[in-house]
Image: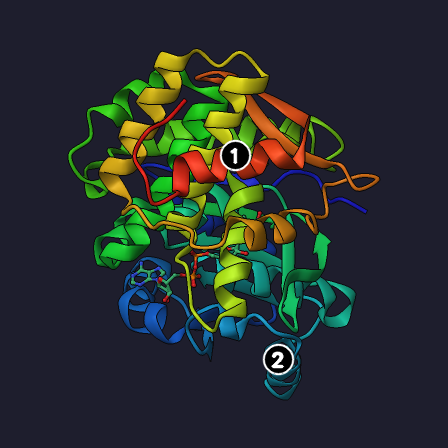
Amino acid sequence: MMKPGAIWLEGPGCWEGLRTWLEDRDPDGVFVLTDTHTARACLPVLDQRLGRDRAVLTIPAGEKGKTVETASLLWQALANAGAGRGSVLLNLGGGVVTDLGGFVASTYMRGISFVHIPTSLLAQVDAAIGGKNGIDVGHVKNLAGIFREPDVLLIDPIFLETLPQQEWHNGLAEVAKHALIADPDLWRALEGLEHPRDISQRLLSAAVAVKRMIVAEDPGESGLRKVLNFGHTVGHALESMALAFGQEWPHGEAVAAGMQVEAWLSKKLCGLPAAEEARIRIFLQRFFPDRPVPDPESCLSYIRKDKKNRGGVIRMALLQSIGKAIPVVEVPGDLVLAAMKECLGETEPRG
Ligand SMILES: NC(=O)c1ccc[n+]([C@@H]2O[C@H](COP(=O)([O-])OP(=O)(O)OC[C@H]3O[C@@H](n4cnc5c(N)ncnc54)[C@H](O)[C@@H]3O)[C@@H](O)[C@H]2O)c1
């Protein structure tokens, strides 16, 4: 059962809003979930603004913490600390902390209140918005989870001041995706960017607005929300393929490569003008390193396992133009292979 949408706190007065909400709620315990990095970089900022007692639970940083084992430790830690149904969990971190914290809060005592305070660019524009919470099981990302909106979502760019370089790039890939699927003005602004750190409050809010608008129209992911998969069908396959070889392909780079391939497919199948495909490629190559894919056939085998496919047919979200996406397009396997060879092969020319 979906809860109604979160109380949205952004911009001046957002902390006052959270303090007031907590006073009204009068919780029997306030718990903050951090990872080892956000405990150091973000907790002091939160404490200064919250000004009240809280207990802190800290998990190891990174995707490796998003497991049922960590969830179980957190349920036990909450119980040991006397958390009751009137307690509140504040999730202070990137997408790992918001996904896991939302899942733990939604299941502890059949659900306690939780607040998302995303601290990475990716979490602020994407992961914390839309009510998807979950954990990885084995090598499968987000295999177990639940749709549940946080009670409050607070977005403050102050946290981005300590964000490492790589994480800016991971977030930029999602900001670019939001522009490409729904906001041509945002796209033009991004084209003028020198460095991901130069993303202004206005551009950040525009990227947040895209995700917010799409999930508001399709909270249960039955149609429109699938446009958010643009670049991710190929991107996820690249990440999985790298993992199988014991390597890691950073999420932002994988999605950027995926967007290049899927833009090329959009040109072939959906009428994306060649000039727009070229602009997309130039932008992505400027911010993300070229990484040739040595074995496109192997990557195709991962794309064939994508959960969006039906009856063995590959399905992707593609672009009609910059700012306009089509949620589901059936794509022949041999064309996907050709696209990968064109965009991620060792040679330069493109058709
Ligand atoms: N629920 C959704 O709709 C959704 C959407 C997209 C992604 N996700 C999930 O989000 C996760 C990825 O999120 P992410 O990229 O934020 O990863 P992350 O949570 O691992 O954060 C990336 C790194 O940045 C650090 N960090 C975060 N904020 C910081 C700050 N302000 N200062 C210093 N360091 C900071 C973290 O400790 C971590 O080391 C994945 O698990 C993915 O599945 C979920």
Residue 99 is tagged as none
Residue 338 is tagged as 1
Q: Position of residue 150 (x, y in %)?
A: 60, 50
Query: What is the three-letter code of the residue carrying label 2?
Result: Leu
Q: Secondary structure at mark 1?
A: helix
98 vs 184: above or below:
below
Residue situated in front as seen by the camera: 201 or 61: 61
Q: Position of residue 59 (x, y in %)?
A: 47, 77
> CB atoms at circles 1 and 2 under 8 Å apart?
no
Q: Is residue 212 visible?
A: yes
Task: Name the residue at the right extreme.
Answer: 311
The residue that appears at 37% across and 55% down in the rendered structure is 119
Q: Quadrant of ligand 1?
A: bottom left
Query: What is the three-letter code of the residue carrying label 1?
Result: Ala
**In screen coordinates, is 301 left or right of 299?**
right
Residue 78 is tagged as 2
**In screen coordinates, is 33 left or right of 316?**
left
Here the colouring is rainbow
Q: Secondary structure at mark 2?
A: helix
**In screen coordinates, is 49 left or right of 150?**
left
195 vs 185: above or below:
below
Is the CB atom of the residue marked by disc 1 within 8 angstroms of ligand 1's nearest atom? no
Q: Is residue 125 visible?
A: no
**Inter-mark Cα distance, 1 to 2:** 52 Å
The residue that appears at 63% across and 33% down in the rendered structure is 316
The residue that appears at 39% across and 27% down in the rendered structure is 206
